[in-house]
Amino acid sequence: MMGDIEEAGQALANARRNANALGELPGGFPSDEATAYEIQRHAISAYGGKRVGYKIGATNPAAQTLLGTDHPFRAPLFDADCYDNGVIVDEPGYGLIGLEPEFALRLGTDLPARSDPYTLDDVSAAVDMVHPAFEMIGLRLPHELFTKVLIVTADFGANVGFVAGEGRSDWRQHDLADVPVQVQVDGEDVANGSGANVLGHPLNALLWLANDLRQTGDHLSAGDWVSTGTCAGVVKIKAGQQAVANFGAFGEVGLTLKA
């Protein structure tokens, strides 16, 4: 079994590195959460990129219903797959499912592993900057499997890339739950939402992540990015199109998918 898990992780890492699609995983798909995360762990190791933070998925009821889960999941963000605002990017060979407009938090202090659970005040105090962001999502596996949370978790949490706009250090002057988020593709309104769609408040997503990592002996570090989950569903985008998400007082983030 362990051999299959290692092979599955290696296959996912190779597919991500080479932008190739996989039809299946060695040994089959994970049947429980522990196995999904173990495959992800081996995929991270085999991919070899520098981790610069985490993405959190399934942080709103609609996403949880789609994925068949009642709680979030996590996966790493890699330096090589993080881009500047306004980037023009290629669609990977395994295809792009879409974009998720998200609040991205940048930590100013560590949230180390500890025995006591973190509180909302603890994690709030650790946040230095808040940025508007897009997460690019896709699977190295067949896209119809995007409704299976264990497969999504194993496959790098469906992360493809991450784009952040300019951040604000005075974010505490605003209630993130009330910040509106509007997305346009080629100037046409396609989606809208708010920070309240992310577990009621984006900081609740960070709290979940800090405590989930704490239970595994892992931790968050100063400088880490935390992308907290979509505020407005999954936005479809085609080659040659430009997407822009407006986060009200927090400005805009955008990208163009190369034609």
Image (cartoon, rainbow, N blue to C red):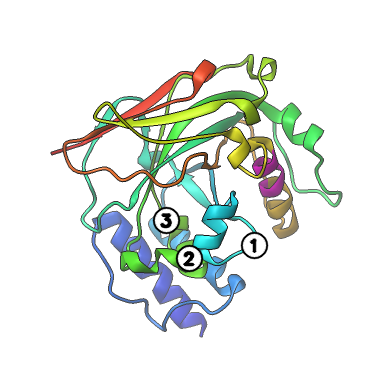
Residue 108 visible at all: no
Residue 233 x %, y %: 45, 45
- The Cα–Cα distance between marks 3 and 2, rounded to whole angstroms, is 8 Å
Q: Is residue 160 left or right of residue 119?
A: left
Q: Which residue position is annotated with label 2? A: 154
Residue 118 x %, y %: 80, 43
- The Cα–Cα distance between marks 1 and 2, rounded to whole angstroms, is 17 Å
Q: Which residues are magenta?
A: 204-209
Report the predominant secondary structure element of the magenta stretch: helix
For disc 2, the neighbor class at 10 Å (few under 14, some 14 to 19, many from 20) is many
- The amino acid beneath tag 3 is Ala
For residue 195, above or below residue 97: above
Q: Nearer the viewer, mark 1 or mark 2?
A: 1
Q: Nearer the viewer, mark 3 or mark 1?
A: 1
Q: Nearer the viewer, residue 221 or 58?
A: 58
Magenta stretch encompasses residue 208: yes
Location of the C terminus by quadrant is top left
- The amino acid beneath tag 2 is Ala
Q: Nearer the viewer, residue 131 or 12?
A: 131
Q: Nearer the viewer, residue 51 or 75?
A: 75
Q: Which residue position is annotated with label 1? A: 70
Q: Which residue position is annotated with label 3? A: 158
